[in-house]
Image (cartoon, grey):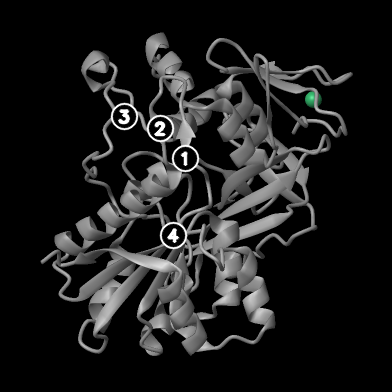
């Protein structure tokens, strides 16, 4: 394991506003107190807030609830909440902190914020699709997951099952979400590994946790709709935050009737430059003769602008939009895509704010034209491709 400079770790925790991270992850609402913030503890059930964020830079949390006693910093929180390792928590927090990746020798030079990180030369996603004969886990049905790092299995029933698929609909990997007994939740990203494992030598295979390696690009979420999108000559590509939002949006805005391809990416906004663009790019190249233009609609979560302890601000909506836009333009340039593309951003402050009223809209029986209009009315053109 790489040993990480302590100063680098401190810099990351300093740059992550803990109350915003915890609100974003858990939905906890915080109130300001004389020395920090307090809110309902996400790790145990309670009616009176006993979860405090404190310290000179509000980097620590502690719960005074009886029998609970969780405490720590942003990294401890992430490890506990997401059930991930220290290194995974560090990577997740790093993306929040907008810090460059850790470079052991060059740490002192690389610590400056770089919002314009060059894309690495990555291999496309190269794992074989999961065989059709393997049943996908279902919500509410117990599933065994093997953790190769700890050489142990766990059994729990997922509350969400998100299946990453290729353009033929074949499953590539799954993101499973589970509830913890104490009210928390955790995620596993798993793929199917054939053959027995130490604990279960006689089984034919097992859902197995895995971590991405930096050299391999990650698949986009929502690619199974690409072929339908081409068939109906869709012109909109809607980009949202997270698998859950993507699933809800895709259900409300069906690709076959509205021609809207809805996608999202694995991990936070910082992971957008780790995406394997090839399948989407190839899909777009195929329609450049039949479709006049493509409009990317960028729909960030309604996170507020955060002022960090050092006085700098963090605008996660802005970051979401710039990361996606840069990555798409880069992919278009690299593959010499000859089509006009427009970038529009949905501003959640507008009258019909996102997410929630998609459901209302569906109940109201909206049709294609309505949505096209709606997208134009609650979004702003922020950029176009080619630029001139
Ligand atoms: Zn607690």
Residue 128 circle label = 4
Residue 120 circle label = none
Q: Nearer the viewer, residue 383 or 199?
A: 383
Q: Nearer the viewer, residue 170 or 140?
A: 140
Residue 262 in the image: above or below residue 173: below
Choose mark 3 or mark 4, whichever is in front.
3
Dot 1 corresponds to which residue?
305
Dot 3 corresponds to which residue?
100
State which image quarter holds ligand 1: top right
| Sequence-first tag of 1 and 2 | 1
Quadrant housing the N terminus: top left
Cα–Cα gap, marks 2 and 4: 42 Å
Residue 51 in the image: above or below residue 7: below
Q: Nearer the viewer, residue 351 or 224?
A: 351
| Sequence-first tag of 2 and 4 | 4
Choose mark 2 or mark 3, whichever is in front.
2
Residue 313 circle label = 2
| Sequence-first tag of 3 and 1 | 3
């Amino acid at each position: 394991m790489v040993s990480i400079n302590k100063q680098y770790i401190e810099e990351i925790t300093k740059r992550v506003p803990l109350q915003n991270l915890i609100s974003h992850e858990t939905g906890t609402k915080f109130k300001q107190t004389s020395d920090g913030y307090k809110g309902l503890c996400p790790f145990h059930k309670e009616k009176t807030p006993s979860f405090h964020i404190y310290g000179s830079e509000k980097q620590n949390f502690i719960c005074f609830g009886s029998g609970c006693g969780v405490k720590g910093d942003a990294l401890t929180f992430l490890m506990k909440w997401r059930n991930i390792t220290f290194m995974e928590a560090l990577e997740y927090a790093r993306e929040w902190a907008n810090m460059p990746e850790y470079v052991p020798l060059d740490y002192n030079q690389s610590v400056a914020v770089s919002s314009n990180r060059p894309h690495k030369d990555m291999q496309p996603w190269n794992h074989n699709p999961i065989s059709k004969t393997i049943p996908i886990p279902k919500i509410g049905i117990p599933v065994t997951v093997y953790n190769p790092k700890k050489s142990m299995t766990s059994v729990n029933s997922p509350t969400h099952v998100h299946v990453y698929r290729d353009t033929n609909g074949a499953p590539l990997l799954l993101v499973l979400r589970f509830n913890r007994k104490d009210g928390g939740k955790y995620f596993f990203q798993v793929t199917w590994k054939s053959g027995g494992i130490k604990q279960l030598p006689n089984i034919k295979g097992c859902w197995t946790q895995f971590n991405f390696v930096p050299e391999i690009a990650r698949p986009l979420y929502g690619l199974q709709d690409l072929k339908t999108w081409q068939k109906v000559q869709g012109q909109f590509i809607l980009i949202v935050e997270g698998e859950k939002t993507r699933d809800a949006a895709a259900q409300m805005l069906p690709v076959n009737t509205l021609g809207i391809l809805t996608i999202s990416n694995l991990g936070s906004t910082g992971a957008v430059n780790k995406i394997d663009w090839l399948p989407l790019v190839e899909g777009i190249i195929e329609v450049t003769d039949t479709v006049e233009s493509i409009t990317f609609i960028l729909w960030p979560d309604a996170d507020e602008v955060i002022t960090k302890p050092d006085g700098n601000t963090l605008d996660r909506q802005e970051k979401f939009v710039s990361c996606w836009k840069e990555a798409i333009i880069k992919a278009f340039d690299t593959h010499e895509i000859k089509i006009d593309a427009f970038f529009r951003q949905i501003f959640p402050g507008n009258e019909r704010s996102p997410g929630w009223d998609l459901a209302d809209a569906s109940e109201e029986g909206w049709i294609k034209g309505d949505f096209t209009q709606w997208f134009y009315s609650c979004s702003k053109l922020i950029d176009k491709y080619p630029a001139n």
